[in-house]
Amino acid sequence: MILPVILSGGAGTRLWPLSRELYPKQLLALISDRTLLQETALRLDGLQGACPPLIVCNEEHRFMVAEQMRQIHIAQTGIFLEPIGRNTAPAVALAALNALSLGDDPLLLILPADHVIRDVERFQSAIRSGLALAERGSLLTFGVVPDRPETGYGYIRTGKSLATGVFAIDQFVEKPDLKTAQLYLAAGGFCWNSGMFLFKASRYVEELARYAPDMLEACRKTLAGKQADLDFTRFDEEAFRACPSNSIDYAVMEKTDQAAVVPLDAGWSDVGSWSSLADVIASDGDGNVLHGDVLTVDCQQSFIHASSRLVAAIGLEGYCVVETRDAVLVTPKDRDQDVKKIVEQLKRLQRDETILHRRVNRPWGAYESVDQGETFQVKRLTIHPGARLSLQKHQHRAEHWVVVRGVAKITKGEEIFVLKANESTYIPPDTLHRLENCTEHLLEIIEVQSGDYLGEDDIIRVDDIYGRSQ
């Protein structure tokens, strides 16, 4: 049995301003009408012996992850919520220990949620090449066959052949400079380290016990405190906080004598920058990749992404321009790795643009900020059919709701009533209230908040079907 473990815990700031901490790149539709997470799950379709994936994500993304799997009709073995980020090695340890506790010892296929793989058949063929060795106890990684001298990835130098399509690992190599990367490409026998793995759960645990016993012990204690919460599994935060943070490569793969590599030539990309994203999307006759409402004059080899308005560009060559409702990024393609410096500046300034978009997803739907001032804020709420907000109240603000589409069921204090389009109600401070969509159609509300404090933490929840704490 193959248990795919999809790691979806990243914050994804290298594709800012589209990717934010609360809406990272794996949850975005960047190369098709499906998100990268959905594409990752769907490329497992038809892989013999594979069961539904186990997804590891963080607390803030849980409802978006669940909703995106529902949209593509993929069941999960489970959704594990990391209490805090501790890198890939502990996340996979929880998956392995949990499987073993259930009496299973599956092959774990470890897949980051934010990669692009264009040739699914070659991808699945590479997995099949490694199954026999993995069953016998080898720990496999998938090394991407390079097509250019890349300085942004670590490399793996392959050794002797162990089986058809599988090789011993001679050496893991850190990210090289350009000259060294050119030498690797010319010499052959080097692969990019992809961060994808295949090994038995028991073998991974054995190697952790040998090379990272403190991590393994912390993960055992973390697993002992697991609790079911709706469709999710929560873990003991205090125990996990004591766990060392490390990657699978550093914790195990670079130390074990049982590591092997399967070369993978399947159109792989980790879309780690705007220029790498442009490389995996079809361009026009001038080499431009254009998305959204974009007009150009004399532009070449540029990536221009418009999310919410017209973007017009003249005379650009080799540039990335990315527009969202609250930010615009302009950078030469060869400097797009410096986006992280902008993100660092924004964090130092405590700007919200690194954390969320104006549109914020919630388990019941989404809200979008329309306008705001010191004592007021206007939002547009979209509530899914059958969904409802928590029963709540606010100490510092009042709310005025106007229905613009659909039918709303309103709880206000002791009253329960229905509002239709063009009808409204006023919710005073300290009044328990709830908004519900009991119909099969979308509900849209314009919410006007007024008060001396408008933060999202001014919510006292009394009842919530989504299990969110106050």
Image (cartoon, rainbow, N blue to C red):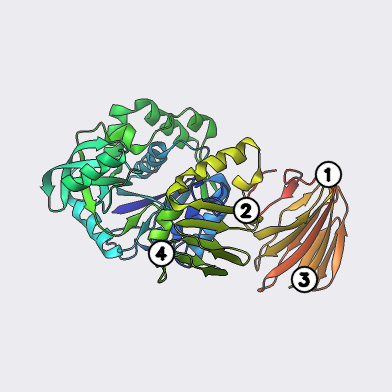
Q: Is residue 38 above or below residue 154?
A: below
Residue 247: name its quadrant. Answer: top left
Q: Earlier in the sequence, mark 2 or mark 4?
A: 4
Q: Is residue 94 left or right of residue 48?
A: right
Q: Is residue 171 left or right of residue 194?
A: left
Q: Is residue 381 left or right of residue 256?
A: right
Residue at numbered disc 1: 395
Residue at numbered disc 3: 404
Q: Amino acid at mark 2?
A: Ala
Quick one: SS at disc 4?
A: loop
What is the quadrant of the C terminus in the image?
top right
Q: Is residue 259 above or below residue 49?
A: above
Separation of residues labelled 4 and 1 (CA atoms): 49 Å
Q: Amino acid at mark 1?
A: Gln
Residue at numbered disc 4: 281
Quick one: SS at disc 1?
A: loop
Instruction: State which mark lies toward you, 2 or 3.
Output: 2
